[in-house]
C-alpha cells in the first residue's frame, strides 16, 4: 500500500496535485510540513498533521519539519478571524526547542537516508533585506493571484463586519511560506509540501514560485482538517487546547479526552491518530459495535495515543486514576497515585486546606468533616453524623462506620484526604 492509498483508507486525504502519486512512486521524495512556534507546545490538532509526516517516513520517504522562526513573527491568516499577537525572537526560539523535542517522539531522526530533519526558516530569512525580498521574490507573483486565495478572501469578508482589516503583514504570509518551499526545493531537493486542507492556498503559492523562478516542478498534498461534530477545529476541550506537553495538559486529562469521545468520533479518529493496521481497526470496530457500552474504540485510541505522546507509565497511572471516580479504585490505588496525577483527577472538586495542628486536634471524624473543614463538606455535626451512620461517607475509599471514631487516616502523599459523600460528591482535604 503506497502513501496515497494509506492516507485514503484512513480518511486523512483531502487533495493532492496531479503527478504527486507518480513522483512518490518514482523515488524517495523529501516532503515537509511547517509548524507554527507561537506556543511552547504542539496540541492534538497539530498531531493530526504530524501523522502525515509519520506516514511519509513509513512509506520510505524523507520527512522534514519546518519550524517557522521567521513566519511565526508574522502570523498566518488561514483560519483566523483576527490578527495574532506577535512574539519576540527569544520566545520563539524557546518554543522551537520545545517543539523539536516533541517531534522527536514521532519521527526518526537517525535512520539513514530518509531520516527526519528539522529546519528553521529564520536561518534563511534573517539576512534577507526587505528590498531584496521584493526584488528577488515579490516580483514573481501578482497581487491578483494572491488576492484569490481562500484564506485571504475569508479574512477580508470577515473583516468587513469587524472593520479590522487584513494587515499587509498577514497578507504577505503566503509569499513568505511560498519562499520557504522554494528555498527547500533549491537547497534540500524538497519536492513536496504537506499540511492541513486550510493550507492549500499557501502551499500552492510555493509550487507556483518554484515554477516561475526556476521553471521547476513541485507537488502539494493536504490532509483533511480534523473537525468536531459541530464543524469546528478538533483539538480543544472545555478548558482549552489539549496540549502534548504534560505541564499544560496532564497525561490523565489527555487520556480522559480520548476516552470521552463519541462513538462516531472514535471510529474516525482511531484511523488518524494511531498506526494500528486496517485489519485490527476493523476488528476493534466490530467488537465495539457488539458492546458499545464497553467503549472499546475509545480505550484503544486513548491507550495508543497516550503511550506515544507520554509514556506507558503515564498511561497506566491514568487508567488507575480513572478508576477512582468510578468507585473501582481502593486505598492502594489512591496511595499509588503521584501527587500531580491525584491533583489532576480531583481538579474541579471542592478543596479545603486545614492546618496540621487543626487536623491533629480534631477529636472525631465528625469534627473533621464539619468544624475543622469550616462547613465545606457538612454544615453541621448533626448532618455529618446522620450520613456517616447511614454509610454514605468514605475517606480514602474506606467507608466510615462510626461518627465518633478518632481521626487516624494515612495521608495520601503525606498531605491529602479524599472524602466521598454519597455516590458522586468528592472533596479533597489538604493538610498543611
Image (cartoon, rainbow, N blue to C red):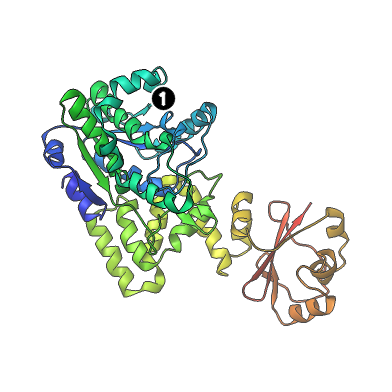
Q: Secondary structure at mark 1?
A: helix
Q: How many marks?
A: 1
Q: Is residue 62 visible?
A: no
Q: Provide residue 226's location: percent of width, then percent of height.
A: 35, 54
- Callout 1: 10 Å neighbours few (<14), some, many (20+)? some
Identity of the residue drawn at 30% across and 47% down: 150
Please tell me whether residue 423 is drawn above or below residue 41 in the rendered image. below
The quarter of the picture where residue 152 lies is top left
Please tell me whether residue 349 is drawn above or below residue 113 in the rendered image. below
Give left or right: position of 350 versus 238. right
Give left or right: position of 117 versus 355. left
As rendered, which of 195 and 312 lies closer to the eye? 195
Give left or right: position of 200 versus 425. left
Q: Provide residue 411's location: percent of width, then percent of height.
A: 73, 56
Identity of the residue drawn at 21% across and 53% down: 8
Identity of the residue drawn at 85% across and 68% down: 371
Q: Is residue 308 visible?
A: yes
As rendered, which of 293 and 351 lies closer to the eye? 351
Please tell me whether residue 403 is drawn above or below residue 76 in the rendered image. below
Identity of the residue drawn at 69% across and 71% down: 394
The quarter of the picture where residue 90 lies is top right
Q: Provide residue 136's location: percent of width, then percent of height.
A: 29, 20
Q: Provide residue 418's location: percent of width, then percent of height.
A: 68, 63
Please tell me whether residue 179 is drawn above or below residue 85 in the rendered image. above
Residue under circle 1?
A: 122
As rendered, which of 241 and 315 lies closer to the eye? 241
Amino acid at each position: 500500500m503506497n502513501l496515497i492509498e494509506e492516507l485514503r483508507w484512513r480518511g486523512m486525504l483531502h487533495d493532492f496535485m496531479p503527478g504527486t502519486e507518480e513522483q512518490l512512486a518514482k523515488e524517495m521524495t523529501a516532503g515537509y510540513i511547517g509548524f507554527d512556534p507561537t506556543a511552547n507546545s504542539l496540541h492534538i490538532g497539530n498531531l493530526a498533521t504530524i501523522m502525515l509526516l509519520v506516514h511519509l517516513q513509513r512509506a520510505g520517504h524523507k520527512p522534514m519539519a519546518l519550524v517557522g522562526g521567521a513566519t511565526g513573527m508574522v502570523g498566518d491568516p488561514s483560519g483566523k478571524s483576527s490578527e495574532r499577537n506577535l512574539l519576540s525572537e527569544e520566545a520563539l526560539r524557546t518554543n522551537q526547542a520545545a517543539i523539536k523535542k516533541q517531534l522527536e517522539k514521532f519521527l526518526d531522526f537517525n535512520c539513514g537516508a530518509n531520516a527526519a530533519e528539522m529546519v528553521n526558516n529564520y536561518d534563511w530569512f534573517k539576512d534577507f533585506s526587505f528590498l531584496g525580498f521584493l526584488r528577488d521574490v515579490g516580483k514573481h507573483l501578482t497581487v491578483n493571484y494572491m488576492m484569490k486565495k481562500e484564506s485571504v478572501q475569508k479574512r477580508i469578508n470577515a473583516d468587513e463586519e469587524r472593520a479590522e482589516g487584513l494587515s499587509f503583514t498577514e497578507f504577505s504570509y503566503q509569499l513568505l511560506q511560498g519562499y520557504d518551499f522554494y528555498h527547500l526545493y533549491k537547497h534540500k531537493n524538497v519536492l513536496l509540501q504537506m499540511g492541513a486542507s486550510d493550507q492549500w492556498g499557501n502551499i500552492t503559492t510555493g509550487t507556483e514560485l518554484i515554477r516561475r523562478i526556476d521553471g521547476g516542478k513541485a507537488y502539494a498534498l493536504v490532509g483533511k482538517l480534523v473537525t468536531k461534530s459541530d464543524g469546528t477545529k478538533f483539538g480543544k476541550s472545555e478548558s482549552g487546547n489539549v496540549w502534548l506537553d504534560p505541564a499544560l495538559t496532564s497525561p490523565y486529562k489527555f487520556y480522559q479526552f480520548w476516552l470521552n469521545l463519541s462513538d462516531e468520533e472514535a471510529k474516525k479518529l482511531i484511523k488518524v491518530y494511531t498506526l494500528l493496521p486496517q485489519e485490527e481497526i476493523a476488528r476493534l470496530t466490530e467488537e465495539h459495535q457488539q458492546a458499545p457500552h464497553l467503549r472499546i474504540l475509545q480505550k484503544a485510541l486513548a491507550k495508543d495515543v497516550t503511550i506515544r505522546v507520554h509514556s506507558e507509565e503515564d498511561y497506566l497511572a491514568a487508567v488507575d486514576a480513572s478508576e477512582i471516580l468510578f468507585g473501582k479504585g481502593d486505598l492502594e490505588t489512591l496511595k499509588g497515585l503521584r501527587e500531580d496525577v491525584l491533583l489532576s483527577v480531583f481538579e474541579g472538586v471542592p478543596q479545603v486546606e486545614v492546618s496540621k495542628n487543626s487536623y491533629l486536634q480534631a477529636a472525631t471524624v465528625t469534627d473533621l468533616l464539619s468544624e475543622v473543614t469550616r462547613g465545606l463538606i457538612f454544615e453541621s455535626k448533626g448532618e455529618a453524623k446522620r450520613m456517616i451512620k447511614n454509610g454514605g461517607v468514605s475517606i480514602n475509599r474506606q467507608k466510615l462506620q462510626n461518627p465518633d471514631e478518632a481521626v487516624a487516616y494515612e495521608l495520601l502523599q503525606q498531605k491529602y484526604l479524599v472524602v466521598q459523600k454519597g455516590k458522586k460528591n468528592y472533596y479533597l482535604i489538604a493538610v498543611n
